[in-house]
Amino acid sequence: MRINIGSLVGQQGSSLTVERELPGDFLNDVPEVRKVVSPLEVQVEVSNTGEGFRVTGNLRLKAVLICTRCLREFTGELSTEIEEEYRRTPVTDFDHNGEDFFPEDDIPLVDGDEIDLTDLIRDSMLVSIPMKVVCDESCPGLCPTCGAVLAEESCDCDAQDIDIRLAPLKALLKTQERRKDNGSTKEKTFKSEN
């Protein structure tokens, strides 16, 4: 998405607002996203700060997502806010010898009288996807034994109240109890002799 900022050049403090709908198909390659079902709504404001141009705004779209707990599909909204500073010329700095150098993480540049927001929009939307997508905060997920979707049905599996990572310790505890019942371990008591 490119925005013409010709009307803002030389007008410090002026701004313009842009609203557009763009395709959000680039999110279809993300594992948590099954399918994008609405256009990407972009609302941005570009302001001339005197030193450059500040872009702020909101991005929003609807997509069919996959819940990481129950693995069911659901339609949800992905949204994020953006803020970025653009400059007409690169920001220069001086090294210890007094020579110009350009920092690697420099501020993005204006291309003529246009600002290209494509990378900013794509990166911001990708970051807006949560690490764990859930259909509902109270989603109980799947039964770890039979795989039943616990929000839709109950199962007859024993409720395991132990973390699966601790299962080897539980087996060790059962082995120790068995030995104790068979008399293979003897309890020792220590008494002080006075």
Image (cartoon, rainbow, N blue to C red):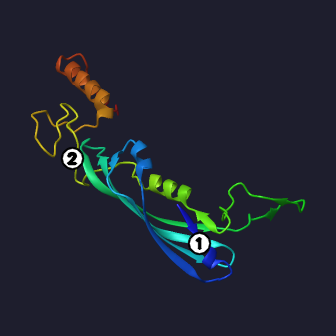
Q: Of callouts 1 and 2, which one flags the residue occurring earlier in the amino acid sequence?
A: 1
The residue located at (25%, 37%) in the rendering is: 162
**x then y, percent, for residue 133:** 33, 49
From the viewer's perspective, is the residue at label 1 or at label 2 nearer? 1
Tag of residue 140: 2
Tag of residue 54: 1
Q: Is residue 192 left or right of residue 140?
A: right
Tag of residue 75: none
Residue toward you, 190 or 177: 177
Report which quarter residue 93 is drawn in. bottom right
Judged from the image, the secondary structure of the residue bearing numbered disc 2 is: loop
Report which quarter residue 180 is drawn in. top left
Q: Is residue 187 visible?
A: no
Decide: few, some or many residues near mark 1? Use Cα within 10 Å; few <14, some 14-19, many ≥20.
some
Judged from the image, the secondary structure of the residue bearing numbered disc 1 is: strand
Residue toward you, 174 or 71: 71
- Image quadrant containing the C terminus: top left
Amino acid, disc 1: Arg
The residue located at (44%, 48%) in the rendering is: 26
Decide: few, some or many residues near mark 2? Use Cα within 10 Å; few <14, some 14-19, many ≥20.
few
**x then y, percent, for residue 192:** 34, 33
Amino acid, disc 2: Pro
Tell me how far mark 1 sits from mark 2, CA to CA: 43 Å
Q: Residue furthest toward the right?
A: 97
The residue located at (62%, 66%) in the rendering is: 114
Residue toward you, 15 or 68: 15
Q: Identify whether 107 is placed above or below 25.
A: below
**x then y, percent, for residue 113:** 65, 69
